[in-house]
Image: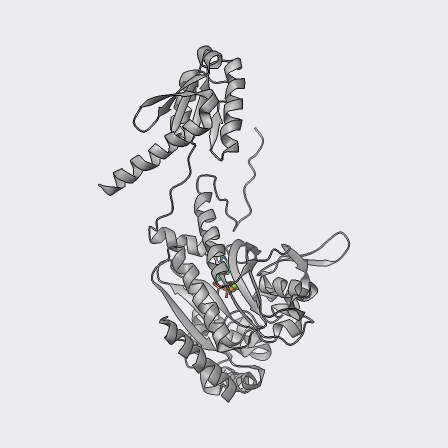
Amino acid sequence: MAEIIKAIKGTCDVMPDDSYKWQYVEQTMLNTALLYGYREIRIPVFEHTEVFSRGVGDTTDVVQKEMYTFDDKGGRSITLRPEFTAGVVRSSIENGLVNGTLPVKACYIGGCYRYEKPQAGRLREFHQFGIECIGANTPAADAEVILLANQVLSDIGIKNLSLEINSIGCPTCRAEYHKALKAYFADNSEELCGTCKDRLERNPMRILDCKSPVCKGIAEGAPVVLDFLCDECKEHHAQLQAHLDAAGLKYTVNPQIVRGLDYYTKTVFEFVSGDIGAQSTVCGGGRYDGLIAQLGGPAVQSVGFAMGLERLMMVLGAQNAEFPEKATCDIYFAPMGENEQVFATKLCAILRAEGFEALSDINGRGLRAQLKYANKIGAKFTCVLGEDEVKCGILRIKNMQNGEETEVNAENIVEDFYKLINTLALDNLTESMF
Ligand code: ATP
Ligand code: MG
């Protein structure tokens, strides 16, 4: 036998029996985003590497260590998207959206690729849902984006998340903060990890985001960004809180949150779960006022977030969240011979055109094996087709829940099958009432 080929480390398959959960979560996200005016944007999985090196920032872990970058056959440097924001901004500039009616409100769902050490909640291919609000610079925009994230998380059934917000200032006040951070960390530079030694020179704020326990420990005593905010950033931060308070959304201000990507300015935030261990941030976002200009667009300010679907599924699993029932086969036709199989194909075609999941034998199995199969897949109704059924067109449709059989004329199959399916819905309703 040929050797089995395994999936790439850090990737996951979703099986046909489980995908309904993903579909439910993704559809809910898109529906909720629509309530805030966000419509889906679809962008390529790969971009010119420069989109990310310039967009995400070349002092970030993502760009320095985690990107899947390769030369294509034409010798161009290509990168699989490690996140969506830079690509969405690239696309909004290229397609002229940023020069049109603002804000541009776009949401997305899809795979992201990062060369990270795989562990629970940290994959090499993972999926994000996110939104970008491009061309709005008010605290009200930040608040709307955070409220949307909160509603998405609650609509998919997640409970017990905490929201943490911070402001990391604008380039003006951050310059002062960087100076203070450099001075602080320079005193402890011997103990910092190799990466952080490098960060100290190029981007000291990144040290606050380091996952090494030693660096984390040192960072605890570091100067706090909120003490360095300029008047405008301070006011923005205060106004955001006024909006969140008005909407009744609880949060804590956590000055340690700096987020992993370089493009953030002013507001940053995270939703964190206590239910899934170390990789606990399920949603991260913030304001990125400089990014559009950095990627060649006009000076318009923006805000957005991204959430990791795998981590959300882990939380839903840990919380035993309920999903809507999985769809099962509406009717299974069990033909006893070849002629009957042709008749089954016709009946299936008629019912599928009406939107029913109608199946029949395609393996040439015997009747017993067919009915066993129908049972296994949870068919709601079955219908055995023999010579008589084909000849007279009178079908006996069996309700698999209570064993009841109903005679139906093949001529009226659509109308009569609607009635049968409706009785089933009614039965279930009365059952759940008692
Ligand atoms: P972390 O600090 O966990 O590495 P990050 O700051 O790199 O996260 P972002 O780039 O802001 O994360 O991505 C937003 C969200 O995408 C994260 O909050 C998380 O839910 C998810 N995510 C990021 N990286 C991964 C990964 N390697 N595997 C699974 N989910 C991820
Ligand atoms: Mg990361």
Name above or below for residue 218 compared with residue 64. below
Q: Residue at x 38, y 53 (%)?
A: 316
Q: In this view, does 81 lie to the left or right of 369?
A: right
Q: Which residue is drawn at 49% across and 29% down?
A: 351
* Image location (x, y in percent) of residue 270: 44, 68
* Image location (x, y in percent) of residue 147: 43, 67
* Image location (x, y in percent) of residue 199: 56, 75
Location of the C terminus by quadrant is top left
Name above or below for residue 31 compared with residue 204. above
Image quarter for residue 174? Answer: bottom right
For residue 119, say whether it is visible. Answer: no
Q: 22 or 360: nearer the eye?
A: 360
Q: Residue at x 60, y 77 (%)?
A: 202
Location of the N terminus by quadrant is top right
Name above or below for residue 383 compared with residue 313. above
For residue 68, say whether it is visible. Answer: yes
| Coloring scheme used | one colour
* Image location (x, y in percent) of residue 317: 37, 51
Q: 199 or 351: nearer the eye?
A: 351
Q: Is residue 79 left or right of residue 131?
A: right
